[in-house]
Image (spheres, rainbow, N blue to C red):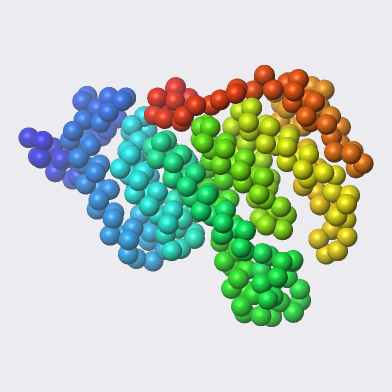
Amino acid sequence: MTSFLILALVAGLAPAVDQCVQCTDAALCQAHLSAQSAAAKALKPKLRGGAPADRVEALQGLARLSGEHSSVPSAEIAEMVASALGDESLPVRAEAAKLLAIDLHPEVAVRSLVKALDEVRGEIGKLGFGGGGGRFGPPTDEDEKDPKVAERRKLREETMSFARAVVDGLGKLPDDRCVESLADLLRQLTRRTGGELIEPVAQGLLNLESRPAIEALVQKIKAAGTGGGDAGGRWGPDTTGKTLHDLLTKAVAARGLSETPAWSTKDPPDWDKWFARNQKQFPAKLGKYDLAKMRKLRA
Ligand SMILES: [Zn+2]
């Protein structure tokens, strides 16, 4: 009977998951589970072989399968998508990161994206800005004509897009491990090493809104200073401190908290004092983002 139902499901003859009387909010019935698993396995060859565009399509197909019953995301499928975080093509990896953070199994998503950020952090440090001779600094007119520079720049752009997808994903998953991972990256980033990630990382931390998330921002604003000491050269003034200060001011105002320090070009704003007074407004811990928490947040 069960095998007949699986065949019927694959052929589209049996009831859909949301109309099945045996599937519940916490689990799929055996027949639907087997059908889902079989359909996922059928996508495996496409995920391994084929062009990058085919692999992206296979990943999207997997996410659709897992999402058929949104309160019971499949850990098996999430693991298949997570394995594409190591794909040789960076755009394929970026798609996997994006899909993991939307609707896939929360525990697999947190674990795999934290690991991916840890790995890509090392690569970001080595990238430079794609200038000639591997030196740091924006490319010159000479560099523009060099095919090696173009290649390096493409690698840089793709690595950054992937890192950005991982960062955006972590900012959507309310779990202390995601806060820790983003806070570590924020400490490491300077505008010379992945400066374009500073704002997305800060935004992710603001979305997560735990006490350590806010504290990481406060510390980075302090470390970045006013930018006045580094005003020369082709880099121009460093606006990191001001950018983070503005983001934090806006987020804090949206929560109805007041008495934020003002920006000054002379001294960094005193967010330490503000944080000491207001830290209790933010949860000390988020806990783990697991299935129970995911269902609660969606309800
Ligand atoms: Zn069912």
Q: Which quarter of the picture shows residue 213?
A: top right
Q: Nearer the viewer, residue 13 or 202?
A: 202
Q: Residue visible at 25% across and 47% down?
A: 39
Left or right: 208 with respect to 51? right
* Rendered residue at 56%/56% (across/down): 122
Classify 145 as above or below 43.
Answer: below
The single residue placed furthest to the left in the displayed view is: 1
Q: How many marks?
A: 0
**Residue at image point 33% right, 58% down:** 47
Residue 269's x, y, as percent? 84, 34
Q: From where the camera sits, is residue 216 visible? A: yes
Vertical placement of 220 versus 49: above or below?
above
Rendered residue at 35%/54% (across/down): 58
Q: Quadrant of residue 260?
A: top right
In this rendered view, identify the residue nearer to me: 168 or 107.
107
Task: Tell me residue 141's x, y (percent).
Answer: 76, 76
Q: Quadrant of the C terminus?
A: top left
Q: Position of residue 265 (x, y in %)?
A: 90, 42
Q: Residue furthest right?
A: 266
Q: Describe residue 99's horizontal placement relative to residue 185 as left or right.
A: left
Q: Nearer the viewer, residue 283 or 139?
A: 283
| Above or below: residue 43 compared with residue 76 | below
Viewport quadrant of the N terminus: top left
Residue 196 seen in render: no
The image position of residue 132, as x and y in percent, is 69, 75
